[in-house]
Amino acid sequence: MVSDKTFRQHRFEADEVAGQRFERCLFLACNFSWLDLRECRFVDCRFYDREEELTCQLQGCDLREASFLRCDLTLANLSRSECLGLEMRDCQAMGIDLSQASFANRITPSSYFCEAYLTGNNFSFANLASCLLERCELHGNRWQNANLRGASLAGSDLRDGEFGQFDWQEVTLTGCDLRGCDLPGLDLRRVDLSGVQINEEQQRGLLEQIGLVVFP
């Protein structure tokens, strides 16, 4: 285990990270790109230098079964990474780039399953364009201004999410659990909500948005 250590502009090599656990470490403008980080654990680590506004590069990494707990991943680049089984909980992830990341295990060209545990994170301004995150744990996240163009969250648990300034028409939500979410701007006439779970208060709000007044 590596703990309470600062790395500055360091290019990590495979033997430094394989199966490693990092706790309370500070990574300043470091490069992990294209490394095998399977089953690595990062707990209470910072990947963002707030004074110089520098982030870390993790694009193209193998992050299968990796874990980030209470980390600062602001603006981190995880694009094109293998993320099946990725765990990310209670992280600051504003502006994180997960575009073209794969959370799916493809059995055949048309058959696949997804696995991810992304809960309690701040994904404001994050880029998850075209991601497949179906039937995954995605509850308690903030999604303000997040880019999910072409993404599918079908069947996922999105409970208690915050969705301000969110483009509902760009993402597939069929079968999702949306209970406890704020749903500003969600138009029932333009978004397929087949199989979606909501509570009574949300139902009233959605109907009022299209001009229907609901009495108790």
Image: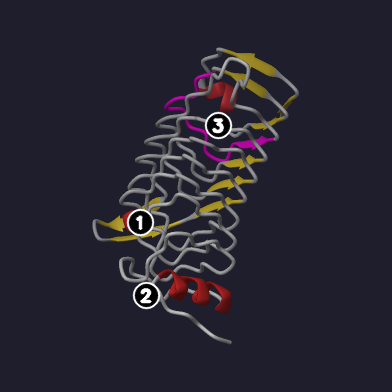
Which residue ends up furthest to the right in the rendered image? 4
Counting from the top left corner in percent of width and height, residue 81 is at: 41, 37
Main SS of the magenta part reads loop
Tell which circle, 1 or 2, labels the residue nearer the N-terminal end. 1
Residue with the mark numbered 1 = 171
Give the alpha-carbon distance from disc 1 to disc 2, as whole Å. Answer: 13 Å
Observer-nearest residue: 101 or 184?
184
Quarter of the rendering containing residue 51 = top right
The amino acid type found where label 1 is placed reads Val
Residue name at image x 54 percent, y 17 percent: 29
**Magenta segment, which residues?**
30-43
Residue with the mark numbered 2 = 194
Residue with the mark numbered 3 = 74
The amino acid type found where label 2 is placed reads Ser
> Is 168 inside the magenta-drawn segment?
no
Quarter of the rendering containing residue 2 = top right
Tell which circle, 2 or 3, labels the residue nearer the N-terminal end. 3
Secondary structure category for the residue under label 2: loop
User: Is the residue under label 2 in contact with that under label 1 (CB below 8 Å)?
Assistant: no
Counting from the top left corner in percent of width and height, residue 125 is at: 47, 39
Which residue ends up furthest to the left in the rendered image? 109
The amino acid type found where label 3 is placed reads Thr
Give the alpha-carbon distance from disc 2 to disc 3, as whole Å. Answer: 34 Å
Give the alpha-carbon distance from disc 3 to disc 1, as whole Å. Answer: 23 Å
- Badge 2: residue crowd in 10 Å (few <14, some 14–19, many ≥20): few
